[in-house]
Amino acid sequence: MKKNSIWKDAFKTLSKDKWAMISLGIVLIYSLIALLSATGLIAADWAQEVGTSNLPPSAEHFFGTDIFGRSVLTKVIRGTQVAMSVGLATSLIAIPIGVILGALAGYFGGWVDDIITWLYTTFSSIPNIMLLISITMILGKGLFAIYVALGATSWVTLCRLIRGEVMKHKEREYVQAATAIGGGHMRKLFLHILPNVSHIVIINTSLQFQIAIKSEVILSYLGLGVQGEPSWGTMIDDAKLELARGVWWQLAGATIAMFLVVLAFNLLGDALRDALDPKLKGK
Amino acid sequence: MTSTSLLSVRNLVVEFQTGEGLVRAVNNVSFDIPAGKTIGIVGESGSGKSVTSLAVMGLLQKPAAKIPQGEIFFNGVDLLKCNDNQMRDLRGNQISMIFQEPMTSLNPVFKVGDQIAEAIRIHKNVSNRQAWDKAVHLMNLVGIPNPSASAHKYPHEMSGGQKQRVMIAMAISCDPKLLIADEPTTALDVTIQKQVLELMHKIQQELKMSMMFITHDLGVIGDIADDVVVMYRSNIVEKNNANAIFTEAHHPYTKGLLACRPKLGANPKRLLTVSDFMTEDGKEKQVPASRIEVYEKENFIDHGQKVLLEVKNLVTQFPIKGGIFGRTVDHFKAVNNVSFKLKKGQTLGLVGESGCGKTTLGRSILRLVEPSAGNIIYDGKDITNIGHEEMRLLRKKMQIIFQDPYSSLNPRMTVADILMEPLVIHNEGGNKNQRYNMARELLEKVGLNASQMNRYPHEFSGGQRQRICIARALMLRPEFVICDESVSALDVSIQAQVLNLLLDLQSEFGLTYVFISHDLSVVNFIADEVGVMNAGQIIEMDKASSIYKNAKEEYTRTLLSAIPKGETKRSLASLV
């Protein structure tokens, strides 16, 4: 037998799944577009007039132009950058909070668990959209407020999952074996238990990523999100007035872009769960 | 095929498609089960015995499993040519099966009576009432006390042995012609195992069924099988009637299997293993006479060594929570007032059934579970109440080897990391290279190859994993090791190798062991002194060399009589 780690095995399973690989490809393409746009290599000139107002899609302008004569395709690309940055920033905020709180609650139990459980049940008892709106109201409109608002709400699921998984693993004999050789709490928690629950973080992130993207679109649509920059949400908002005049391409561009990436993340998340979750092995 | 054969397997080949190519799990296997007879299929894990039974049941995982060749005739019908519907009709009705793990084979949310009745209703055209009555009748037949009340119980309200009885009741509910039992007693205590074996034998006789009994332990089937088939590495190596197998085994593997189980009283200094009888490539080997000389333990007991561990009136109790607020309403004393002394270099064996408190006692001594009262004196120092940090440092000297080699190794660490971790924790062994070399040396000492250092635990077999656990426990050169059921999860042939290894290591490093097991013959072989535990207390303690001859307590005698009798039919010398 060759040297096989659990990650390599999982990747092997994943690479046999056609839809997972297509989804992974889509996610990578979106990431690349977002990266190129963020570094200013493409779509930096999104505010430029490229033709007359509201031109329908043509070979020259793939998604047509908007009311100010700007290219809708360039706006979609710019919107991709916003969407992906929201997903990434949300994950960067939610993962550390969710993992650390969940791990502490699950490992130590007792009053630590009580406090953390109280915290996340409180968070999850407030309707998400209300919480998002109130945080953006407090912090003011803009991208930064969206990062914080989504980060602050999306750690809850991860925290709950990690807590349960850590509780299960801390009773396992390999953790007792670590105690028996004199390992301290931090070693047991961070070196033994966490690597064994890390697959949860990956699965959950890929599912949370698309929730964050959708939430950004909703917030921007409500006028609470990105200001002065194109986003799929503001594009859809603009399109609702134009639709009556038969200008459908702005709506189509933003929706197709969002549809593809959300679907890709969902399929990838499911496939990752199949590949990584030992409970489903052999089914 | 003879006319009396109920089941006839002819030249069966089963192959599995794996990542590493096609693997042949069953190679050209043929055997017959005559009507009304019991046939035992014996072999170690991976020998193909379970795959054979799954092939008969038509339960092989398709498409990974392929049957390129062979025939399985049941009552004259080739099962391999039956479609899914025909097989479903046969399964549970004419052929039924009992699995190893009674804890997971029953559905936890249904009453056991309903589960048995359901099995009846699927195959027989009867009313709910009739099915229920039949279920109660069957529970009576399998010896469950007060069956009409017990039928209303849920699986968690029953003990392991009772659950296995329910499984048997379910399996025989449609009067099957063939009962396949796959390691039905391996998960049970020896005393329960004996009862279940007797029950299966009785039922087989009464219902005139045929039975196919699969096990890794030849001793178990000695009393109930008419014929025995020995499987090794996908092949049948020996087929004979049960008496002949025990008295005049021919194949070296069979001899090895017979010899490797420790016997009460007369054992050689190191247990014989399959490798004593057979070379790697399957050729017979001459066993040197010195290997079978009976070794008298009395010889080395008591050279006036100092007492290393003393346990005084130890009590460990767990709260029982009750009421809606989970208040503590009572305490359950898992260890109740236990005292003993253990001298350096000796082995204390603790034996008892599951739930007797032996595991809790072991963990309390290491303070993996905090004791509630009493004293643990290690090397002259009372360690019952010392601080967390002081205890952590002491763990260098006191180690434990767990029961389950599958769950006691972190699956995300390589063998090298697992072995080096104790050194890292206690900042010993110099730099990384030196630690790596120490780990490699010890890995070779426990019989594994140094080239396997960078592998992950799941790439090893159960016996190899237990060797890794042993190596990990010895990395810090401890003085004292607790072996908690450390060989119970292993096949008998592997068990002998691991027991020998533990003894070799003991004499090389001067280790002191507390050896915990439910199997009196194993404890008797490895220990100098044996303590019998029941309900949290040590009820009898004696030298290993004499406890099996003059047991004073009734309970000890029960444990002794539960040891499978298969091996008493022959002596070691007759095998060589």
Image (tube, coloured by chain):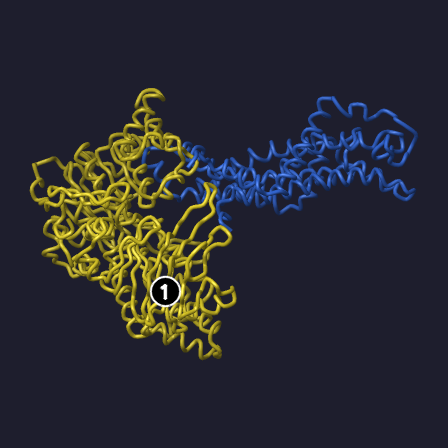
Asked if residue A68 is positioned above or below residue B552 in the image, the reply reads: above
Give the chain ID for the yellow colour: B
Q: Position of residue B521 (x, y in %)?
A: 19, 52
Asked if residue B183 is positioned above or below residue B370 in the image, the reply reads: below
How many labels were placed on the picture? 1
- Residue B387 appears anywhere in the view: no
Q: Quadrant of residue A30?
A: top right
Q: Position of residue B375 (x, y in %)?
A: 22, 42
Using residue B315 as the reference point, say whether residue A18 is left or right of it: right
Asked if residue B177 is positioned above or below residue B472 in the image, the reply reads: below
The residue indicated by pointer 1 is B8
Using residue B252 as the reference point, say whether residue B299 is left or right of it: left
Q: Which of the two residues, B299 or A150, is positioned nearer the viewer here?
A: B299
Q: Which of the two residues, B75 or A124, is positioned nearer the viewer here?
A: B75
Asked if residue B518 is positioned above or below residue B141 in the image, the reply reads: above
- Residue B547 appears anywhere in the view: yes
Q: Residue at x 15, y 40 (%)?
A: B346
Q: Position of residue A168 (x, y in %)?
A: 44, 45
- Identify the secondary structure beneath mark 1: strand
Q: Amino acid at mark 1?
A: Ser
The residue carrying pointer 1 sits among few (fewer than 14), some (14 to 19) or many (20 or more) residues within 10 Å by Cα, namely many
Give the chain ID for the blue colour: A
Check the residue under mark 1 and report the chain it is in: B
Q: Position of residue A130 (x, y in %)?
A: 70, 43
Using residue A90 as the reference point, say whether residue A79 is left or right of it: right
> Can you say which quadrant of the picture contains the N terminus of chain B?
bottom left
Q: Quadrant of residue B204?
A: bottom left
Q: Residue at x 12, y 35 (%)?
A: B306
